[in-house]
Image: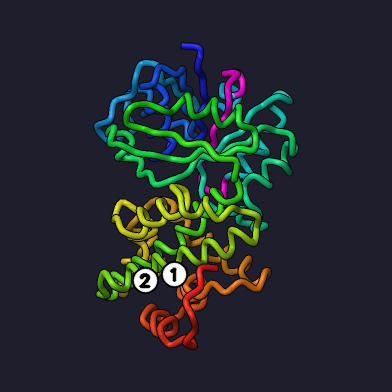
Amino acid sequence: MNKKIAILGSGSWGTALAILAAKNGCQTLLWGHNPAHIAALVEERQNRRYLPGVPFPGTLNLTSDLRDCVAFNSPLLLVVPSHAFETTLRKLKPLVADDVKIAWATKGFNASSGLLLHEIVAEVFSVQTPAAIISGPSFAREVAADLPTAITIASTQADFSGQLANIFHNSRFRTYTSSDVVGVEVGGAVKNVLAIAAGIADGLGFGANTRAALITRGLTEVMRLGIQLGGKQETFMGLAGLGDLILTCTDNQSRNRRFGLALGEGKDKATAIQEIGQEIEGISAAKETFLLAKKYAIDMPITEQTYKVLYEGLAPLAAVENLLMRELKPEGIY
């Protein structure tokens, strides 16, 4: 019982990770910003809204007070939407000690600046602050149900990634470590954009050929941007790159894919968002990825057409036709 972790974010993924850590014998504290929601979790000992029927282990405690997380004297794992990431860090800043360790399972860019999330951690705290990201092909419901899963934990400080790996690893949840924080971040952010594109194609009634082409050429776009930003090519061929891309483009547990399906079926953006009722990270990621591609003059045609559907009112069918009618060229990886 010497392992401890405080997890900030009581949505489906934060709750699943908290359940996993607690099942592993780790003293676990789960924080949520809504006191009423946390009170319901305490009373029912399950997250009925996001993971109904999955009971909380006895070593899982709950709070809506950030000061409790800081007093827990453990690494802090943020599992909040990307738009709330910086705000949450700034609320933590005056409360934590200088030796705080920050990890996150949030996927996306900082919405206001387009920065990667490790850059926000360094900006709010310091470049010396131990920082790590957890990412990879993992749906919360399957993790909570103990279905076999493998993920990547990336940090430039091997002792921190190793500490987190030991907290979460078990016979059904395999943890790999990496030093490529940038590559893991880019893979986790851009795959959500491509999942929207894949959903649109399927919603239009296109088949497996189209989906396979989008995933393959989408991976090329991830690699182009990721390598430009400092990521390693091998990362994009691993769990946090290709693995996560396949998962979120092909299974309807993906909110981003379902959102794209709705658009392809003719629903408007607002209706699709309302029907899903949870955060769709690919919407903001499409804008940030598009702007980064423009900034670095990187060819990312699938991202560009997805951006135009979401922000310029381009018809989904026209977006697909634009991709197919591009100038002929040799196939290149990046």
What residue appears at the point 44 percent right and 81 percent down from the top-left corner?
A: 323
Residue 161 lies left or right of residue 28; in this view the side is right
Residue 188 lies left or right of residue 12; in this view the side is right
The C terminus lies in quadrant: bottom right
Q: Position of residue 24 (x, y in %)?
A: 39, 21
Q: Position of residue 95 (x, y in %)?
A: 68, 26
Q: CA distance from mark 2 to mark 1?
A: 6 Å
For label 1, the SS is helix
What residue appears at the point 48 percent right and 40 percent down from the top-left corner?
A: 152
Q: Disc 2, disc 1: CB below 8 Å?
A: yes
For label 2, the SS is helix
Q: Residues within 10 Å of mark 1 (few under 14, many from 20)?
A: many
In the picture, the disc for residue 217 is: 1
- State whether residue 329 is above or below residue 281: below
Q: Which residues are magenta?
A: 70-84
Residue 77 magenta? yes
In the picture, the disc for residue 213 is: 2
Residue 211 magenta? no
Q: Nearer the viewer, residue 329 or 322?
A: 329
Given the image, on which type of amino acid does mark 1 rest?
Arg
